[in-house]
Amino acid sequence: MRVLFLGDVVGRSGRLAVIEQLPGLRERYQLDFVVVNGENAAGGFGITEPILMELLDAGADAVTTGNHVFDQREALVFIERYDRLLRPVNFPPGTPGRGAGLFKTRSGADMLVINAQGRVFMADLDDPFRAIDRELEACALKSGADAILIDFHAEATSEKQAMGFFVDGRASALIGTHTHVPTADEQILPKGTAYISDAGMCGDFDSVLGMDKEEPLQRFLTKIPTARFSPSHGEATLCGVAVDIDDATGLARAIAPLRVGGRLSQTEPAFWL
Ligand SMILES: [Fe+2]
Ligand SMILES: [Fe+2]
């Protein structure tokens, strides 16, 4: 089973990269399932209903989010209408939307997608470890789902690595998001779960985390905000990871980064060529 995960889409540049590249990538690699993190898709902050539709139309099977999920207030309402849009599962009880979903892949397999958020240097949500554990208990690999992909949206690499080992052997892949910078630690953990600390962003890398670099730089220099953060509009690098999953076990056979366009070094998964 061939799964592609794309990291946080930032603003118009990031959306354009996804819209222009994803249909071709689906075709080129014969992808069975695509997950896109859309938490920064609307001007860098949150997601709107038309933008969600754009991402789904471009070929996303599920759209995950993170701490910015409700930056566009309308998301509090429309998230209830789209089971393909997920928010972190460990938000407090009663939060609109859902944190996990079971979806059909192109070949008819059952793919469980879980979205959770870390707590180190982030908002103090419910315990993500127990929240993910509950989801994996309710819909386990092979008995409940043919494959399980977890988007762990977290700041600290320590928390992400710990979560990787916590789900090792129980999920097909645990992919980190939120920092917007791709890490080079992609690997198959000892019990068969594919892991990377951060998938990176789909955004312009001539920027600070996808935002125009002037304002962040001024804030570091002077500690005084002078303007709002706005997305950088240069050509985005489409940043993600490719995961090849064994249909028989639901565990990962290979993981590799995928980077297309923009300023970062280009790379594609050799095992699918
Ligand atoms: Fe983000
Ligand atoms: Fe985030």
Image (cartoon, helix red, strand yellow):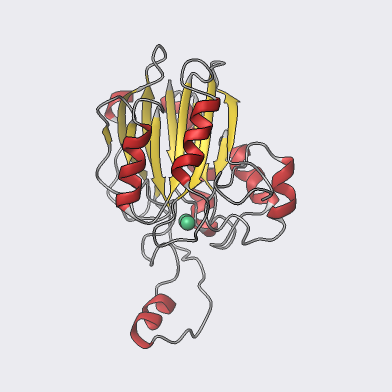
Q: Residue furthest top?
A: 248
Above or below 81: residue 148: above
Q: Residue at x 49, y 53 (%)?
A: 14
187 horizontally vs 5: left or right = left
Considering the image in quadrants, where does the C terminus appear?
A: top left
Q: Position of residue 70 (x, y in %)?
A: 63, 57
Above or below 135: residue 249: above
Task: Please tell me in which quadrant of the rendered image residue 234 appears.
Answer: bottom left
Considering the image in quadrants, where does the N terminus appear?
A: top left
Residue 255 in sight here: yes
114 horizontally vs 50: left or right = left
92 horizontally vs 126: left or right = right
Viewer-nearest residue: 254 or 149: 149
Viewer-nearest residue: 29 or 122: 122
Viewer-nearest residue: 205 or 126: 126
188 horizontally vs 89: left or right = left
Task: Please tell me in which quadrant of the rendered image residue 243 appears.
Answer: top left
Q: Residue at x 40, y 62 (%)?
A: 121
Total labels drawn: 0
Q: Position of residue 45 (x, y in %)?
A: 56, 62
Above or below 129: residue 138: above
Q: Position of residue 190 (x, y in %)?
A: 24, 27
Q: Position of residue 125 (x, y in %)?
A: 52, 55
Residue 239 in sight here: no
Q: Residue at x 51, y 40 (%)?
A: 131
Task: Please tell me in which quadrant of the rendered image residue 241 appears.
Answer: top left
Above or below 29: residue 133: below
